[in-house]
């Protein structure tokens, strides 16, 4: 695990991650709970925001109302001034029009006062009642002045103005003044309260936003790590399994799907471990058996090699004496005995070839055959094979040609064995071809020599191609009867080619002919066995 | 099948019979019980918009210059006998009437007062009103009135006087100065009654502020109250 992860797991956050992992709930529920938590926080934020906005709106309304009341108070003050003005004007003009103006102003005053009274907060009612009382006095005085003017009682009107109306108006003005002062004080306090509320809501919102982001980050981190940890554990565990270390266990705090998964993995691990152990025991047994088999096989090969060697000595004696007899060194051979003697010689040679093949194969299998590596000439090999077999080709009436490019340089390898290989292939080709031709080609390509023998013979069925290089195999037993042969030639050839570091192959079509070829390095060192 | 008018007449006749029996026992004189009805369809009257002093007067006023009941009866019409009998036994009209000014409306809108009688005009509104009338026979008056003050005005000559308020143009009141007791004001159904009339032939006159004056001759009997329907043409 990476160091930051370890550091994280050691921190309180790591404890939280493990605690969340231990919660007995499904991944789905945990994710849902996380999202709901954050959503809930946002909903709470919105609700608080709305409450704050509503409170601010309420205070703004109060401010508006207070402002309106101040405006009405100002109108009252204005109406008072206008009444005084119009009263003076009416005293001068003394006509009904100017009187109506006073009355109109007085009614305007009344109307505004009535609005103010309805809108006023309870603590201002008493003040407004005082204004109302004074205004009712003023109303009576204005009516008296109006009526006095209409009756032409100018002196009465003037007296009323000075002694009654003016003091009343001054009283009203003072009262309205204190009303305005009260309202303005209220407005000031509302303004500061609104401003405080704005600051408070700004801080609250910022706090909520920060908290939401922190909770979202922490929640996302904790929940995701509570899922990542078991996945990492599982990853390490599976790496162990992939590398063949079975039997480990995985420990995760999770009690969710990951927990269940870990349990399954542990079960799987135990099973794998058990199977691995069983397999190991079986392999051990097999290895022992194989070793004994190898020993037995080598013993068999050695026995065969020794046996072949021992067989060759008497056989050579038989062949030698037969030849001496046929050469009539022991006197004239009766006509009736010559044919059996030739038969003895022919069969004896065949037996010797067979014994030689078995000896070679046994040596190879027993690992006792060593290549005699040295310089050789490809042309010479091909010439030896041609001269050995051309009489057979002539007897069977087959065309037999060889083709060696002149530019091939001297090659390195066991020339004698390679001659044996080519002789085997070409001999087989001549043996299995009734008519047509057999050709030997050699070519050099990029340091590799390919010897190729092409015939127009009986061909090999596709299903038999794989088997023809195995020991004692011919395509079928009837062929052995017709064409003879030990069935060991191809097998020995294959081994020899492989000992040179090359390979052998065949392309064949049943009834049309075959091409056998082997490829060896131009400079084989014999080290490749 | 009863037409609405016939049904009305039948209904009022039954009513008149019932009340007539009781009055017949009290007085030997005859009486008229009738209804003032509108002939034709009532004109559509627009509400009066109030532009000033809305706090006291309201935002608009119902037009009250012609109020007709669903049955066609005209409210606040004044019915009187043109030539009253010499020896009348009718009870005199009250010599003092009261008119209030409330929410910038004269209540009642039409008031009857005998010659030499008085009307107490009261202002119940929290603002100034200004009683103003320029009659033909009686002296004019133009009086500013604060809240709660009563102004009493005497009327010595018979006539119909329009009273207005200088400050509130929609305010209308009517004073009918009666020179004899046989004056009656119709109620909400347009009904009126004139009592203490000796039997005989009379000319009934009816006045309404919008529809003007009409007259009708009636014969009043001794015992039974005379039922009469006065029709006023819509215009």
Image (tube, coloured by chain):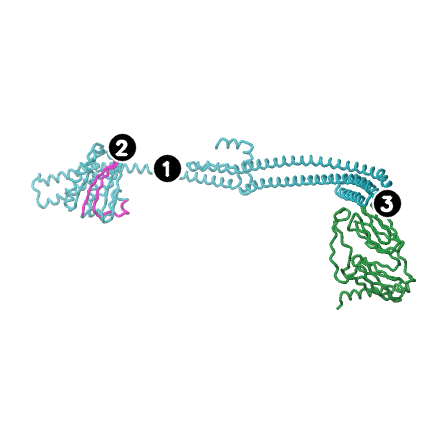
Chain colours: A cyan, B green
Mark nearer the viewer, 1 or 3: 3
> Residue, x 84% and y 38% (percent of image)?
A162
Q: Is residue B190 above or below residue A501?
A: below
* Mark pair 2, 3: CA separation: 155 Å
Marks 2 & 1 on one chain: yes
Q: A313 and B182: which one is in front?
A: B182
Q: Can the viewer see residue A302?
A: no
Mark nearer the viewer, 2 or 3: 3
State which region is magenta. A436-465
**Quarter occupied by residue B226:** bottom right
Label 2 crowding class (10 Å Cα cut-off): few <14, some 14-19, many 20+?
few
Q: Chain of mark 2?
A: A
For the residue labelled by badge 3, is the local secondary structure a helix, a strand or a loop? helix
* Mark pair 1, 3: CA separation: 145 Å
Label 1 crowding class (10 Å Cα cut-off): few <14, some 14-19, many 20+?
few
Circle on res. A527: 2
Label 3 crowding class (10 Å Cα cut-off): few <14, some 14-19, many 20+?
few
* Residue that extends furthest to the right in the rendered view of this protein: B87
Query: Which residue is under mark 1?
Result: A284
Mark nearer the viewer, 2 or 1: 2
> Would you say B101 lies left or right of A4 here?
right
Q: Chain of mark 1?
A: A
Query: Which residue is under mark 3?
Result: A151
């Amino acid at each position: 695990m990476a160091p930051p992860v370890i550091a994280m797991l050691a921190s309180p956050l790591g404890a939280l991650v493990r605690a969340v992992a231990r919660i007995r709930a499904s991944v789905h529920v945990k994710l849902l709970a996380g999202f709901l938590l954050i959503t809930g926080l946002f909903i709470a934020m919105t609700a608080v925001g709305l409450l704050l906005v509503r409170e601010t709106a309420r205070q703004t309304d109060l401010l508006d109302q207070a402002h309106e009341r101040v405006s009405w108070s100002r109108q009252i003050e204005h109406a008072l001034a206008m009444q005084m003005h119009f009263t003076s004007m009416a005293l001068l003009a003394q006509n009904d029009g100017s009187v109506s103006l006073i009355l109109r102003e007085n009614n305007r005053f009344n109307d505004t006062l009535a609005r103010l009274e309805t809108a006023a907060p309870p603590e201002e009612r008493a003040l407004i009642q005082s204004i109302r009382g004074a205004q009712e006095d003023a109303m009576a005085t204005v009516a008296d002045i109006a009526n006095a003017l209409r009756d032409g009682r100018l002196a009465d009107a003037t007296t009323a103005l000075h002694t009654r109306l003016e003091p009343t108006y001054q009283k009203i003005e003072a009262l309205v003044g204190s009303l305005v002062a009260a309202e303005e004080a209220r407005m000031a306090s509302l303004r500061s309260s609104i401003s405080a509320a704005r600051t408070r809501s700004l801080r609250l919102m910022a706090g909520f936003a920060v908290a939401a982001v922190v909770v979202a980050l922490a929640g996302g981190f904790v929940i995701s790590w509570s899922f990542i940890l078991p996945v990492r554990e599982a990853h390490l565990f599976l790496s162990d399994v992939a590398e063949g270390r079975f039997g480990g266990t995985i420990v995760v705090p999770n009690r969710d799907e990951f927990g269940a998964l870990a349990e399954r993995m542990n079960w799987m691990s135990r099973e794998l471990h058990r199977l691995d152990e069983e397999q190991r025991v079986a392999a051990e047994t097999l290895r022992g058996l194989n070793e004994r088999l190898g020993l037995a096989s080598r013993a068999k090969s050695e026995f065969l090699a020794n046996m072949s060697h021992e067989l060759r000595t008497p056989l050579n004696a038989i062949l030698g004496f037969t030849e001496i007899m046929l050469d009539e060194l022991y006197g004239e051979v009766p006509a009736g005995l010559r044919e059996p003697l030739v038969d003895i010689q022919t069969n004896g040679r065949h037996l010797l070839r067979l014994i030689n093949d078995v000896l070679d194969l046994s040596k190879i299998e027993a690992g006792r055959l060593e290549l005699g590596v040295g310089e050789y000439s490809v042309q010479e090999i091909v010439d030896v094979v041609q001269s050995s077999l051309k009489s057979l080709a002539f007897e069977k009436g087959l065309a037999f040609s060889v083709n060696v490019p002149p530019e091939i340089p001297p090659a390195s390898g066991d020339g004698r064995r390679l001659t044996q290989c080519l002789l085997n292939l070409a001999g087989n080709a001549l043996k299995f071809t009734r008519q047509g031709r057999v050709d030997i080609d050699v070519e050099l390509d990029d340091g590799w020599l390919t010897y190729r023998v092409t015939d127009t013979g009986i061909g090999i069925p596709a299903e038999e191609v794989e088997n023809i290089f195995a020991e004692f195999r011919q395509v079928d037993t009837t062929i052995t009867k017709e064409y003879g042969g030990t069935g060991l030639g191809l097998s020995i050839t294959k081994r020899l080619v492989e000992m040179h570091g090359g390979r052998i192959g065949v392309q064949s079509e049943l009834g049309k002919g075959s091409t056998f070829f082997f490829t060896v390095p131009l400079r084989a060192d014999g080290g490749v066995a | 099948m009863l037409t609405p008018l016939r049904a009305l007449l039948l209904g009022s006749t039954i009513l008149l019979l019932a009340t007539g029996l009781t009055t017949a026992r009290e007085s030997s004189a005859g009486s008229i019980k009738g209804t003032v009805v509108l002939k034709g369809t009532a004109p559509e009257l627009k509400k009066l918009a109030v532009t000033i002093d809305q706090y006291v007067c309201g935002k608009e006023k119902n037009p009250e210059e012609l109020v007709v009941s669903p049955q066609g009866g005209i409210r606040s019409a004044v019915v009187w006998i043109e030539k009253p009998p010499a020896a009348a036994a009718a009870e005199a009209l009250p010599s003092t009437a009261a008119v209030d000014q409330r929410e910038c409306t004269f209540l009642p809108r039409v008031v009857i007062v005998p010659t030499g009688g008085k009307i107490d005009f009261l202002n119940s509104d929290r603002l100034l009103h200004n009683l103003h009338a320029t009659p033909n026979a009686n002296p004019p008056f133009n009086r500013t009135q604060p809240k709660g003050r009563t102004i009493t005005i005497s009327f010595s000559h018979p006539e119909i006087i329009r009273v207005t308020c200088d400050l509130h143009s929609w305010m209308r009141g009517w004073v009918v100065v009666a020179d004899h007791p046989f004056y009656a004001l119709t109620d909400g159904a347009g009904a009126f009654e004139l009592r203490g009339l000796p039997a005989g032939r009379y000319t009934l006159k009816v006045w309404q502020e919008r529809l003007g004056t009409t007259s009708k001759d009636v014969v009043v009997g001794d015992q039974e109250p005379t039922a009469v329907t006065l029709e006023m043409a819509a215009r």
